[in-house]
């Protein structure tokens, strides 16, 4: 995999998708999802100009951050679901966490962040499709279901009030292999929920929408994504 070439291709596609949506590509953060990939490949992405990296295993996250200590302009995103007992590396050295899916993990991180004297930017992960296999707060029927709406607004407010956690928006994943129209609808519904939460929970910024992966990041950008998490298109297929 020529990572410099694949980075150029992805950045060009981001540029064109932004143009179609009347947006500036500068408002879209490309997160290179480097999970399971060796540090040499991350270095190649760095040399190609990428600065944001995404990982989904706590131990691997810590190891890679330690390895790249001498390149402090790398920005580290934890994008996967986090077990409570594995939260420490994220509190100690993470910059962004994309998958807050329960109050407990937010509380735990907040306590650890307090100890380290750090802050963490987070996205609340939501499950819009109602797929059983998906993590995230269940908002599968939020437009019609007042109780579901109240639940997400309440947990969003509680998490936004934590001293060390900055809630900056919502994260979602579209069902794998769905038709484009379904994927687009998932992203649109995520964006609308974000607008609603902006009014309900004004203490958070709600500027961010973390959505879009290798198969759907261009659609996500057309629908307002500000963070796209791209792995395979940059680094090639993973083993598992
Ligand atoms: C692995 C992963 C990605 C990247 O997926 P690709 O299809 O390789 O682009 C994005 N987001 C999350 C949460 C992931 O786990």
Image (cartoon, rainbow, N blue to C red):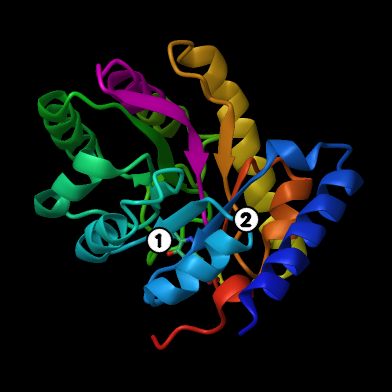
Is tag 1's residue or tag 2's residue first in the polypeptide sequence? 2
Q: Position of residue 3 (x, y in %)?
A: 62, 74
Percent from the top left, x then y, of residue 148? Answer: 41, 34
Q: Residue at x 38, y 67 (%)?
A: 133
Q: Residue beneath label 1, please?
A: 134
**Residue 110 to residue 86: above or below:** above
Which corner quadrant of the image does residue 131 belong to? Answer: bottom left
User: What residue span does the magenta drawing correspond to?
Assistant: 153-174
Residue assigned mark 2: 49
Q: Nearer the viewer, residue 210 or 72?
A: 72
Mark 1 element type: loop
Q: Are marks 1 and 2 in contact (CB under 8 Å)?
A: no
Residue 150 position within the rendered picture, expressed as x and y whole percent measured from the top left? 40, 24
Position of 78 with respect to 26 (left or right) is left
Q: Nearer the viewer, mark 1 or mark 2?
A: 2
Q: Is residue 21 left or right of residue 173?
A: right
Residue extending furthest toward the front? 70
Q: Quarter-wise, where is residue 102 in the image?
A: top left
> At 56% from the left edge and 33% from the top edge, which residue is drawn?
208
Q: Is residue 114 above or below residue 133?
A: above
Count of numbered badges drawn on the protein:
2
Quadrant into which the C terminus falls: bottom left
Q: CA distance from mark 1 to mark 2?
A: 32 Å
Compared to residue 30, the image places residue 120 above or below, namely above
Instruction: Give how far across and how far down residue 218 sits, in percent.
Output: 75, 58
Q: Is residue 170 above or below residue 135?
A: above
């Amino acid at each position: 995999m020529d990572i410099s070439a694949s980075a150029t291709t992805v950045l060009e596609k981001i540029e064109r998708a932004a143009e179609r949506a009347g947006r500036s590509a500068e408002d879209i953060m490309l997160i290179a999802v480097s999970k399971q990939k060796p540090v040499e490949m991350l270095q190649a992405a760095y040399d190609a100009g990428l600065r944001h990296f995404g990982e989904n295993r706590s131990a691997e996250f810590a190891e890679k951050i330690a390895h790249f200590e001498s390149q402090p302009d790398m920005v580290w995103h934890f994008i996967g679901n986090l077990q409570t007992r594995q939260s420490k590396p994220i509190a100690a050295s993470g910059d962004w966490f994309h998958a807050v899916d329960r109050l407990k993990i937010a509380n735990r991180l907040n306590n650890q962040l307090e100890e380290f004297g750090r802050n963490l930017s987070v996205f609340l992960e939501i499950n819009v499709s109602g797929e059983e296999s998906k993590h995230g707060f269940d908002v599968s029927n939020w437009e019609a279901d007042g109780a579901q709406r109240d639940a997400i607004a309440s947990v969003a407010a509680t998490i936004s009030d934590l001293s060390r956690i900055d809630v900056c928006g919502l994260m979602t994943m579209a069902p794998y292999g769905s038709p484009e129209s379904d994927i687009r609808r998932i992203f649109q519904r995520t964006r609308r929920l974000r607008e609603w939460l902006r009014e309900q929970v004004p203490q958070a910024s709600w500027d961010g929408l973390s959505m879009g992966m290798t198969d759907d990041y261009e659609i996500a950008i057309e629908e307002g994504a500000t963070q796209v998490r791209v792995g395979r298109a940059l680094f090639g297929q993973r083993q598992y």
